[in-house]
Amino acid sequence: MPFDISSSLLIILIYSSLWFIISLIKKRNDIADIAWGIGYILIVLIQLFTLPNSPREILIFILITIWGLRLSLHIYLRNRDKKEDFRYKKWRQEWGKTFYLQSYLKIYILQGLLLLTIVSPALIVAQNPQPALSIIDLIGIAIWTIGFLFEAISDFQLAKFLKNPNKQGKVMNKGLWKYSRHPNYFGEVTLWWGIFLIACSSPNGLYAIIGPTTITLLILFVSGIPMLEKKYENDEQYQAYAKKTSKFLPWPAKE
């Protein structure tokens, strides 16, 4: 069977269902966050072995694989030996008797559909004959690199801060966190716009804008920044930090 959108949907359905089963065994839904990055790698890897390859497809495969491996490993190490993430714990309490059904549909299946939407630049590049790489691709790589470094460095800085026994009652406001309250999310959004730019030279490449647009809207208005901001809405130290620090775009802090 040729690898197309229908194949991708089937693969993601099976993949999401397997992770749901693992979540039942582990009795924690935050493993969905580990599955997130690996799912992208699965899709682009299957494309790589089932479709004719172009330099642009190989480039996108490399960038997504680097990002996905780092993110999944980071989340695994962060959550290891800790209780279930507060977001998933809250849903566990709210959903009550319908917890299993809602978990499957609202976490695993929905995440799989969002994944396919966000990875659309890779899907479009794989399905179309590709022109040679150009300066636009180099600009896309540069933007991806900026985003990846922001995400990786800020995650590292926060992880180091959280390991400090003297952090109790303090807010992380050093390094990249001095310029943005969510520099890791800024990096995530930025790198996907870089991948979109690489896909732009592909036939129908402009349709791939749905990918970075989706992740941007999710992070800014749905499951990223809003949930964390709400968690700390009654934290005086965090609110003081918020008053002088940009929410998303890196910017010098107000004095």
Image: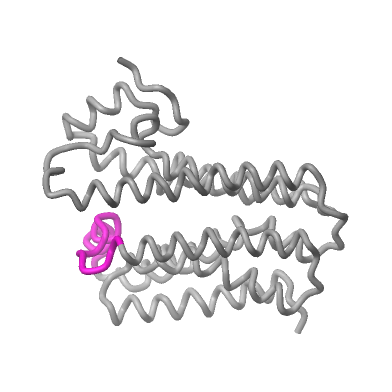
Where are the magenta residues, as a range? 78-96
Describe residue 5's horizontal placement relative to residue 91 as left or right: right
Count of residue discs: 0
Instruction: Give above or below for 164 relative to 183.
Output: below
Residue 182 highlighted magenta (yes or no): no
Residue 33, given in percent of the width and then of the height, sits at 40, 63
Tell me the chief SS of the magenta region: helix
- Report if residue 95 lies within the magenta region: yes
- Tell me what residue is drawn at x 71 percent, y 51 percent: 208
Locate the C terminus and report the quarter of the image it occupies. Answer: top left
Quarter-of-image position of residue 71: bottom left
Place residue 77 in its image quadrant: bottom left
| Above or below: residue 106 compared with residue 149 | below
Q: Is residue 77 left or right of residue 11?
A: left
Indicate the position of residue 37 as horizontal and vertical percent values.
49, 64
Screen quadrant of the N terminus: bottom right
Q: Position of residue 59 (x, y in %)?
A: 70, 60
Q: Position of residue 145 (x, y in %)?
A: 58, 47
Q: Nearer the viewer, residue 15 or 102?
A: 15
Task: Give me the residue at 39% from left, 29% from top.
Answer: 179
